[in-house]
Image (spheres, rainbow, N blue to C red):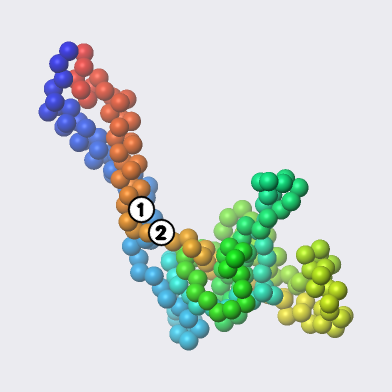
Amino acid sequence: MKINIFRALFWILLLAILSTGVIYFFNQTALTNASNPVKVISSDNYTDVIKNNIDFEDVIEITGTPNLLNQVSQESLAQDNRSDKKIDYYYVGLKEYGFDFVVKVKPGKLIAEKQNFKGRVVSLVQGEFGSRIKNSLNKPISFEDSVNSEAANELDAESKTQIADRSVATFTNSTFLLLDGENEDSSQVVLNIAFWAIILTVFLATLLRKWVFGLR
């Protein structure tokens, strides 16, 4: 059994080109987004013109102050104790931008101080729980909830009413949801394309080995 090396190299090269093309096609959007410049936004330069120039899937860097009266949490069961829940993320509005932005942040970053957030922007109602998150953000704070029980004991009735009124929001379907820390890196996308192109090439060469290597 003799293998024609030049024939094998030709078909492997052809399969590699085909595999790269297929993987590139499925990653084209990610590569385009990663190559786009980051849009930097602050309360000093923010206008309706800038807002209208933001598209979903853009990567933006924004400076703002989390509004703790407009925030909800995303929880899951703790791995070490199935009866306990842990907070995975917070969804919080930014004081300087009204109801135009909500930021998805990890618990350690939710502080009432001005800071920078950077990531992709999507629609607030995108995903399975999008509408539920929006509706929860728009509802007034309830001091009947167990998470607010400690604060409720420290406040009088008038203060509770004022806080509840101030916590009412009007986030909409067109509100931007900034996924803090979730932004594509162009070099990482290229490496990902190369990795999966090699895997696909090896798979196809193995699957078609009799034809590629001229085996009889």
Relative placement, left or right, of 157 versus 35 is: right
Residue 89, above or below 42: above
Tell me the CA gap for discs 1 and 2.
7 Å
- Residue 172 in view, yes or no: no
Q: Residue at (35%, 65%) from the top-left corner?
A: 36
Q: Position of residue 135 (x, y in %)?
A: 69, 65
Q: Amino acid at mark 2?
A: Glu
Q: Nearer the viewer, residue 159 or 134?
A: 159
Can you tell which quarter of the image residue 107 is in?
bottom right
Q: Residue at (68%, 55%) from the top-left corner?
A: 86
Q: Position of residue 214 (x, y in %)?
A: 19, 20
Can you tell which quarter of the image residue 16 is in?
top left
Q: Which mark is residue 189?
A: 1
Residue 24, above or below 209: below
On-image quarter of the C terminus:
top left
Q: Amino acid at mark 1?
A: Val
Q: Position of residue 25 (x, y in %)?
A: 34, 47
Mark 1, secondary structure of its residue: helix
Label 2, on which residue?
Answer: 184
Q: Which mark is residue 115?
A: none
- Residue 184 in view, yes or no: yes
Relative placement, left or right, of 14 versus 98 is: left
